Image (cartoon, helix red, strand yellow):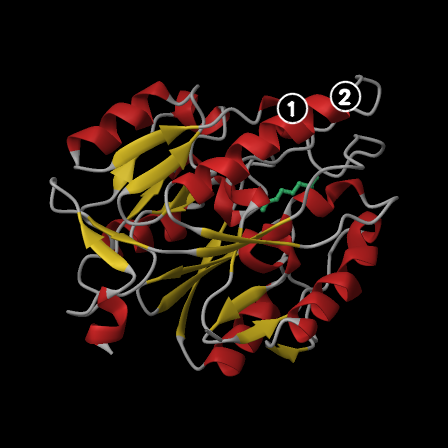
Amino acid sequence: MSILRQAHESVQSTGRIQQRRRYLMCRPEHFTVSYRINPWMEPAKPTDTAKAVAQWQTLHDTYLALGHEVELIDAVPGLPDMVYTANGGFIIDGRALGVRFRVAERSGEERPFMDWFAANGFEVIEPIEVQEGEGDFLLVGDTILAGTGFRSVGDSHREIAEVFGREVVSLRLIDPRFYHLDTAISVLDPVEGPGGVEKANIAYLPAAFDDESRRILEERFPDAITVSDEDGAVFGLNSASDGYNVFISPRATGFEAQLRERGYHPVLVDLSELLLGGGGIKCCTLELRGNR
Ligand code: ARG
């Protein structure tokens, strides 16, 4: 196992281990804001699809330039939120759990994502409970952090524990601006290293959680980076990490400094146009784990 992993890893000068990732993305060809399902969306405000595509392309190209693999799913006309592929499923070890959206506006995305997983060699598991995929489920080491409060229902946490046979830690979101877990927690070291999971760490926005969830986070992640409300409010935590490069919004300047102090390498990518739909870097990125 460790020998296989080594081909995908490189140790950086700061001691951080960079791991090669495989992501699923969707070019925002039909991006617009035509309905309002989170506080960021204002249908009356014009959007610029060409700008969204250009910003998205920069993220895509940056992943490739830093050694990652990116797969693409075709955008479907009439499904403007499909660019937020993190909500398309949750995948570990080549097994893809599909999603059941809470919001009717996005239910048309469920089948295209499951079809893509099947066509690309993943074992597809059809979900029973309402949940929005990697938007609310984050793998940290070998534990799944699971969000509820706005979109994914509590019962989906039990279902995901059964499907993947992993420990699931439920966390409750309380601020409507941070309606998916990936807007309030950033996983910095997403996959267990050869020596185990001891390095897996996170960054989070304390104010996004209820008291009990905050207590759980403090206890489990004593070394976590806690970000300021300002950085949280510009979707600073909606970021992807390969263990060394952390892809973040250029507006999250405090978080950027915190990452540098810890030996990570912040890579700044501006997705301001996609923020009009209530999504950022992580929302546009679904991690494909396994089946290779
Ligand atoms: N407009 C989309 C929605 O409200 C944005 C999804 C953002 N995705 C995420 N993983 N946080 O569903």
- Label for residue 273? 1
280 up-or-down from 97: above or below: above
Question: Is disc 1 in contact with disc 2, using a CB cutoff of under 8 Å?
Answer: yes
User: Could you say which quadrant of the image residue 50 lies in?
Assistant: top right
Give the image location of residue 239, x and y in percent: 44, 39
Q: Residue at x 54, y 57 (%)?
A: 134
Give the image location of residue 199, x and y in percent: 19, 57
Pointer 2 local density, CA inside 10 Å: few below 14, some 14–19, many at least 20: some
User: Could you say which quadrant of the image residue 45 lies in?
Assistant: top right
Q: Which residue is drawn at 41% across and 56% down?
A: 21
- Label for residue 47? 2
> Residue furthest toward the right?
78
Give the image location of residue 6, x and y in percent: 22, 66
Give the image location of residue 230, x and y in percent: 42, 20
Q: Residue at x 33, y 70 (%)?
A: 142
Helix, strand or loop under label 1: helix
